[in-house]
Structures are given as C-alpha cells and as structure tokens.
Image: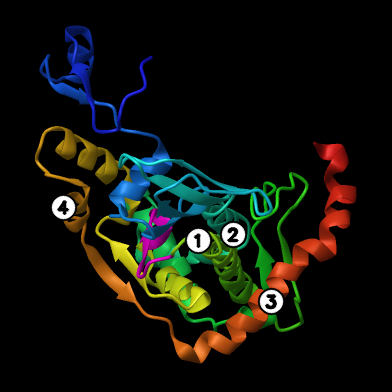
C-alpha cells in the first residue's frame, strides 16, 4: 500500500465494512499509526524533547526528536512520528507491566484472595481487577523506599536495551531473613522503574529530555507507581487523563487533525491534560541512588551465568 501520513484520510468507509461495524458508509477513514506512535501523541508529546514513559504489558521510554537518531551501543533507535519531520527515539523494555502480572499471580495471590473476600468483589471481574491494583498499590505504599535493599531485575523474557540478551532473566538480589513478601512486591515495581531511568540516562546523551515526563499506560493508574517513577528518576512526572487509553487518544487526535478540528499538532497536544503531578521526594534520593548503581551492575555480573542457565532452553 501507499505510504501516507498518520493524519491522512485514506478514503471513505465502504458499505460492507460499515455494516459489520454498525456505522454509516462514507465515514472518513484516517491512517493513524502504530502503538508507540499513537501513545506518543496521546501523551501530548509533539515537540523535540517531549518525553513519555509507558507501562503496559511491555514498556518503553520515548522522546520526540527532529532527526533520525541511532545508538548502537545501547540498542536504541528512532521511528517515524505522527508529526511530519519528527521521530520517536525509543528504549524498549520487553517485560514491564508483565512483571506486575507475574508478581500478582505468583507472589501476592494469597494475600489478594483474602483482600478480595473482605471487599466482597470476588464475583465482579471489573471490581476484582480494580481491587487487585488498589491492593498492590497499598502494599507498595506501606513498604519503605528501597525495599529494604532488595533489588529486582525485570528481564523475565530477556532484554532489548540498553543491552540485548535473550538469555537474561529476572532475579531478586539481596534477600535476607527480614525480606518479606511486601518488600519483594515493592522491589518489582522499583526494578521496572530502574530500567526506565537507565533508558533516560542513555537517551539524554543524544537528545533533550523535557520535563515533566508524561506517564501513560495501565501502570500510570497507580499514584504510588507514578511517585516512585519521580523519585527514582529525579524528574517531575505528569499523569494524563485516562492514561490507560493514551493510544486511543492518539488515534482520535489523528482524526481531529485530519478533519481540521485541531489546526496543528501543538494545539492538539494542548488539549491533552495532565491530572496529577508528582515531584521527586528528596528523602528517597540516597537509597535510590545506591540501589540503582547496584541494579546496573547486576547484568554484567551475571551475563555468563544467564547464558549457562538458559542457552539450552532457547
């Protein structure tokens, strides 16, 4: 097919498709784009240096740049953005929110079962999901920053950047007799965000990183996670309206631009509001600086062990 801009109207909706969708024939169809491109626009990031953090099943950090950018050392590159002449420079995390699913299913499930029975929501799938997220947020909030020195590596399905290794795996480092389940749960959240900080540091060598960071995806629903992101990165974090729907917002923004509802990308971005702002807590800086230094060393210290343990499994 012909390559077109994200905001191009590619034609009217055909009669057959309209019948299947329950829509009127002739509705304009707009090209749109891929998930990361739409998330970027839905986060309100359109100018060079505008940066967002996404936590879904996978995760990434992406910054808008006005030239193609490549970092072979850290395995980061740019893809076309929705705005002509602009690109999204990305560091991608293979498992991000997936780590939270893992900790829910394999570490926290028994406590969650007790919690749900107390809230009388076990039979309501939507309430059950909301309560699980709420419960995990409470667990993390009640556990001191730094998880008592426990550090988690979020490479449950290998890793892409700033190093690529299909053999890398997750691990808990520095467990002691006092390392209970709640510390492990908090360590998982912190480990996901240490990886995001690693991306930001690598990206800052190649491009500007504007503040506040925009935070989107299902992971941004938790104010606790957003605050930890601010504390670990040392940057102000802004959470947009309905962060779990940022991709759909970006797609709708493309339609608005195509139909002339927005005169330009800047006006479009101005319509995407931030509902929560999280500033770094200086009291947590020292513990996170120490743990982050250790976190970055864990792969180099265990690279050969990962290969030995997992080479026959691939």
Q: Secondary structure at mark 2?
A: helix
The disc at residue 78 is none
Kindly identify the residue that appears in the image at 65 percent across and 54 percent down: 74
The reply to whether dot 1 and dot 4 touch (C-beta < 8 Å) is no
- Distance, label 1 to label 4, CA atoms, is 46 Å
Residue 29 visible from this viewpoint: yes
- Counting residues from the start of the chain, the first of labels 2 and 3 encountered is 2
Q: Residues within 10 Å of mark 4 (few under 14, many from 20)?
A: some
Which mark is in front, 2 or 4? 4
How many labels were placed on the picture? 4
- Counting residues from the start of the chain, the first of labels 3 and 4 encountered is 4
Q: Which residue is mark 2?
A: 103
Q: Residues within 10 Å of mark 2 (few under 14, many from 20)?
A: some
Q: Secondary structure at mark 3?
A: helix
- Counting residues from the start of the chain, the first of labels 2 and 1 encountered is 2
- Distance, label 2 to label 1, CA atoms, is 14 Å
Please tell me whether residue 86 is drawn above or below residue 281 in the rendered image: above
- Distance, label 2 to label 3, CA atoms, is 24 Å
Q: Which residue is mark 3?
A: 293
- Counting residues from the start of the chain, the first of labels 3 and 1 encountered is 1
Which mark is in front, 3 or 1? 3
Q: Is residue 215 magenta?
A: yes
Kindly identify the residue that appears in the image at 20 percent across and 16 percent down: 11
Q: Nearer the viewer, residue 312 or 290?
A: 290
Counting from the top left corner in percent of width and height, residue 104 is at 55, 58
The disc at residue 267 is 4
Residue 105 falls in image quadrant: bottom right
- Counting residues from the start of the chain, the first of labels 2 and 4 encountered is 2
The disc at residue 113 is 1
Q: Write the start and end of the magenta stretch as one range.
A: 209-220
């Amino acid at each position: 097919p012909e390559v077109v801009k994200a905001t191009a109207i590619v034609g009217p909706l055909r009669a057959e498709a309209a019948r299947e969708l329950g829509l009127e024939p002739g509705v304009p169809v707009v090209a749109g784009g891929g998930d990361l491109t739409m998330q970027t626009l839905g986060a309100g990031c359109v100018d060079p240096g505008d940066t967002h953090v996404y936590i879904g099943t996978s995760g990434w950090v992406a910054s808008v740049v006005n030239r193609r950018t490549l970092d072979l050392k850290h395995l980061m590159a740019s893809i076309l953005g929705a705005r002509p002449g602009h690109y999204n420079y990305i560091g991608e995390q293979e498992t991000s929110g997936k780590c939270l699913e893992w900790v829910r299913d394999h570490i926290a499930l028994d406590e969650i079962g007790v919690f749900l029975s107390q809230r009388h929501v076990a039979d309501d799938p939507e309430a059950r999901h909301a309560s699980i997220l709420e419960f995990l947020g409470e667990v993390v909030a009640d556990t001191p920053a730094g998880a008592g020195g426990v550090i988690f590596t979020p490479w449950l399905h290998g890793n892409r950047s700033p190093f690529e290794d299909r053999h890398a795996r997750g691990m808990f480092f520095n467990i002691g007799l006092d390392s209970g389940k709640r510390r492990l749960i908090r360590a998982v959240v912190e480990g996901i965000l240490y990886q995001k900080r690693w991306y930001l540091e690598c990206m800052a060598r190649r491009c500007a990183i504007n503040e506040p960071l925009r935070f989107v995806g299902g992971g941004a629903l938790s104010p606790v996670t957003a605050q930890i992101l601010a504390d670990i990165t040392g940057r102000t974090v802004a959470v947009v309206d309905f962060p779990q729907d940022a991709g759909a917002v970006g797609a709708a923004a493309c339609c608005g631009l195509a139909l002339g509802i927005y005169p330009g990308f800047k006006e479009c971005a101005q319509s995407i509001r931030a509902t929560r702002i999280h500033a770094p807590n200086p009291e947590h800086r020292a513990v996170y600086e120490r743990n982050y230094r250790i976190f970055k060393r864990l792969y180099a210290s265990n690279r050969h062990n990962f290969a030995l343990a997992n080479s026959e499994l691939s």
